[in-house]
Image (tube, rainbow, N blue to C red):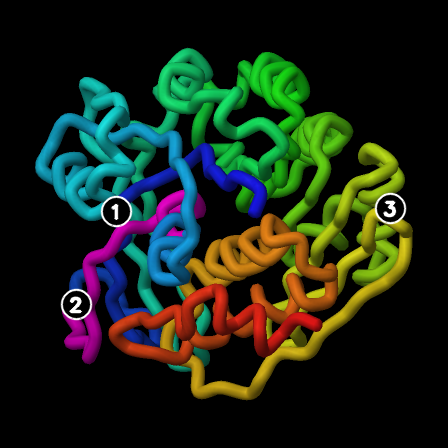
Amino acid sequence: MRPLAVIGNVNVDLILGPAEPWPKAGTEIIVDHDELRVGGCAGNSALAWESLGVGYEIAANVGNDQFGTWLKEALGEKSRHWPVEAVGSTLSVGITHPDGERTFFTTRGHLPLFSFDEVRAMLDGSRLRGGLVLLSGSFLTDALTLAYDELFDWADAHDIAIALDTGWPLDGWTEANKQRTIRWLKRCHCALFNEVETTTLTGQFDPFEAARSLKAEMPVDAIVVVKRGPDGALAIGRDGRDYSVTAPRVAVIDTIGAGDVFNAGFLAALAAEMPLEACLRTGVTVASEAISTLPRSYGKPLSALLEETGQ
């Protein structure tokens, strides 16, 4: 199995809900569910890999408050070398709605201070040679994002394939944000975007056509994945062929982090050299389990999932 790692945003998620209608200012409502958990794309992916029994490394940072201590404790030995910044930790409050969707309120916190020097001190490029690295939270990790060219050079020097999931820009998909993302994708070997992000980036209505447009901007051997929620996922493979899988019908409880969990399942299967369709199916299976369980579960270990979804 190829080495796996994730670089990016780990923060605290406080999940509350469901709430409907949205309360008026100055009022208070009671909700049925609350959960404090590790969040952020990198954090959610790491939790899924832990549950799947997958070996991985993670480069992240935290703030110098009780939340930062709690985040490091939650990831145990994996977080031993995380830098502690002289600010409070990033906190996201997610309000869920009866249809499974959500609204976020997020502080800037520690994430903008995360730097490439810190990443390089945590990850051994030689140990990750030939592996896959998920790069996440691009619009939150300001200092690191400014050094993406250095990060891509480091990855190239160690034959590391970068899989990119930028997340949603805080100021939306402005023309500048689109151009920055396309520039990053030219250095990446896997794109992991949801359907709205993919069609918005390309201006293409059809998700397959949008995926092809992104692939045309990337290295010839790149893979483009489009996460489609209840409609499953699709991909354009290294060979240019189309792949698509459906999602099982589940009773949705909480969709927060669903795309991040998909990333974890998909990349774990890809690192295990599984066929692309099996990788898509693994990602969808793990994400479907996560959004339909409370407390959250990620299903079977990866070895069992690969037996079911592979060839």
- Of the numbered discs in the image, which one, if any, rests on residue 12? 1
Q: CA distance from mark 2 to mark 1?
A: 25 Å
The residue nearer to you, when weighing 22 against 162, is 162
Q: Nearer the viewer, residue 133 or 208?
A: 133
Residue drawn where x is 66% and y is 53% of the image: 273
The question of residue 288 being in magenta is answered with no
Q: CA distance from mark 3 to mark 2?
A: 47 Å
Q: Quadrant of residue 236?
A: bottom right
For label 1, the SS is strand
- Residue matched to label 3: 213
Which quarter of the figure has residue 194?
bottom right
Residue 184 is left or right of residue 306, and the answer is right
Task: Answer whether residue 37 is magenta in the image.
Answer: yes
**Nearer-N-terminus badge (3/1):** 1
Mark 3 to mark 1: distance in Å?
35 Å
Which stretch did the figure color magenta?
28-44
Mark 3 against mark 2, which lies toward the viewer? 3
Q: Residues within 10 Å of mark 1 (few under 14, many from 20)?
A: many
Residue 148 marker? none
Q: Amino acid at mark 1?
A: Val
Q: Amino acid at mark 2?
A: Thr
Residue 152 in the image: state x and y as whole percent: 63, 21
| Residue positioned 69% across, 28% down in the render | 184
Residue 156 percent coordinates (x, y):
67, 20
Q: Are marks 2 and 1 in contact (CB under 8 Å)?
A: no
Left/right of residue 261 with respect to residue 207 in the rendered view: left
Residue named by callout 2? 27
Q: Earlier in the sequence, mark 2 or mark 1?
A: 1
* Above or below for 119 versus 58: above
The C terminus appears in which quarter of the rendering? bottom right
Closest to the observer: 174 or 137?
137
